[in-house]
Image: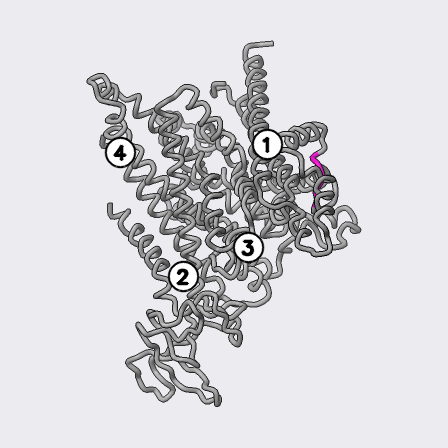
Amino acid sequence: MNVRSTALCSLFLRRVLRAGAELVAVSLLVFAVTTIAPGDPFSDVRLEQQVSADTIAALRRAEGLDRPFLVRYAQWLRSAAHGDLGRSIAYRSPIAPLVARRAVNSLTLVAAALVVTWALVLPLGVWTAARDRATDGRIVASGASALIAVPDLLIAIALVVVAARSGLLPTGGLRTAGAADQAGVAALVDRVRHSLLPVLALTLIAGPPLFRHVRASMLDALRAPYLLAAAARGIPYRRRLWRLALRAAANPLVSLFGLSFAALFSASMMVEVVMSWPGLGPLLLDAVRTRDEQLIAAGVMLATLLLIVGNGCADVLLRSVDPRISM
Amino acid sequence: MTRLLGPAIGVAAVYALVLAAPFVAPYDPTTQHRDRPLAPPTRVHVIDRDGRLHPRPFVYAEDISGATHAYPLRFFARSSDDSAVGRGSRHLFGVDAPAEVFVFGTDTLGRDQLSRLLYGGRISLGVGLLATALALGAGLVLGCIAGFVGGWTDAAVMAASDVFMALPWLYLLLALRAALPLDVAPARALASIVIVIGIAGWARPARLVRGVVLSVRGRDFVAAASASGASPARVLRSHVAPEVFSVALTQASILIPQYTLAEITLSFFGIGIGEPTPSWGSMMGVMLRQELTLAHWWLAAPAAALIGVSLLYHATADALQRRSLAVGVSR
């Protein structure tokens, strides 16, 4: 084993330990917060005259709501470690499969948006940086900075309104009702059509700030003296731009990748709610409304876990790709 | 400086407008004109049907008999509003009953959209301001302590901020929101939203302030000041505070629109300030539900207002950043 792979292993190990510590801390915070919450899922039941106080007490005991905080936290941690996240009181079902299904939906959306955003932002940033003196490059650049100022929520709402008015794209859900019966390709097309709008919204939300960074980083790289030297040696323009300058500009962008994942993940929550995408977002919102504390804890924990794992993976991967970044 | 002046005046004007809501708004934001749901903006005329010019703008309305009359706008007049809140107060403008003047139309329940926009702006912009004060205040105190004391204190504060920053922003907001009661009176709901956003947001300013404190402490002139006997309080006052203040100001211009949007998003989700109290968020909820079936463009007023406010803040933050950069270079 050489020095580099040892360093990578130790980086990986440190990352895992850090992520674990962060998760435990987050879980304690989330659990504490949901316990402070006034009322419980049986608050509404209490208003009914026919239900006696004893019945409610029995119900609370059955769900384990009467035990002290640390006992419940320890219990929750133990079962979470076994893959059992408890039971949702509102949905009357185990939380783990419920949350897992939603998390997969959220993750596919974020992953698709991540790919689309970078695929769009990178060439656009390079192009506008190269055409910094020209009108077309300037127009695209100022359009992007105008988009930064438009609040996320409004972008999502505007897209829904436009899609609904034009009837071009479905505005909500994962698939058309009954589409599951269709043949493989038709079902897939239906699925893609449904995800177009949320992916577009996420791209428009997360894209402009990234674009600005790519462009700024490219502008810096293009000013470097070695590019002038490369030009003097007769290296063609395209090669200079896409091979030399981009590679130099990529270094600061590497750290942005994880940040873009976090931004997309958070924005995805709102987009999911606005476009009724059955991801973690709407589930969590319902959980807050119905005071389903176990579900809130599980949803937030899972979102954090996904974010930490995603960030960590991106970090380790990109560091192993680029030998210049110190570990 | 000129870059900063324009946007700053714009922002101040918006706050002045919503602060003066009880005077500027012609109606109470919760009064329902039941016979006029989703009324389009009232047309204000200066030239009547016979082609005569009127010095005082007027609106047309039908009286009880069904005949159409012109009703002049009254400026600085006492309210004709029947609600307990609005009775007898002076307003910027209004018309005598039975005429009504809805500058931005009415919503689904026949409530004046302009009045709701102004009162809702008080809530949404006010929450943004208060939450920023809370988050920035906590960030300043904790960041300064962490930067100055160092050691275990620093490590603890940074670890705590790590936890808060590990959570995705909206998920964090929702988790914290779950800790506070949902169905409460407007004043308490307002307080809980401010607390939720403030607590969710303390980590980033705290880290920033700590960084500034550390970098200032490392400079030669600060070391020289300490060496020549300046007390820590003096170092804090004359060397650290100015730097921190400039960073905090720029940070505020970034955080205020972000937290305003946070309130709007929470109210849009239905877990912010509940009806009938207006907020730009809940108004946008009405807009989205209605716009999907019918074109009622005036319902988009809060969206337009929000875009305007964020553009103003964007320009302000931009100018502040440029200025602090310029100051940094010239030093």
Q: Residue at x 60, y 29 (%)?
A: A309
Say which residue label 1 marks: A27
Pick the front one: A257 or B38: B38
Q: Is residue B304 above or below residue A281?
A: below
Q: Which mark is residue A159?
A: 3
Determine the chain carrying the residue at label 3. Answer: A
For marks 2 and 4, give the CA distance. 36 Å
* Quadrant of the rendered image containing residue B330: top left
| Few, some or many residues within 10 Å of mark 1 (<14, 14–19, 20+) | many
The answer to whether dots 1 and 4 both sit on one chain is: no
Mark 3 / mark 1, whichever is N-terminal: 1
* SS at mark 1 in the image: helix
Say which residue label 2 marks: B118
Picture coordinates of residue B87, whole percent (x, y)? 39, 71
Q: Visible in this render: residue A322?
A: yes
The answer to whether dots 2 and 4 both sit on one chain is: yes
Q: Residue at x 30, y 72 (%)?
A: B76
Say which residue label 4 marks: B242
Q: Are the residues flagged by discs 3 and 1 in contact, CB closer than 8 Å?
A: no
Q: Which is closer to the viewer, label 3 or label 1?
A: 1
Image quarter of the C terminus of chain B: top left
Q: Amino acid at mark 2?
A: Leu
* SS at mark 4 in the image: helix
Determine the chain carrying the residue at label 1. Answer: A
* SS at mark 3 in the image: helix
For marks 3 and 1, give the CA distance. 35 Å
Q: Are the residues flagged by discs 3 and 2 in contact, CB closer than 8 Å?
A: no
For marks 1 and 2, give the CA distance. 40 Å
Q: Visible in this render: residue A117?
A: no
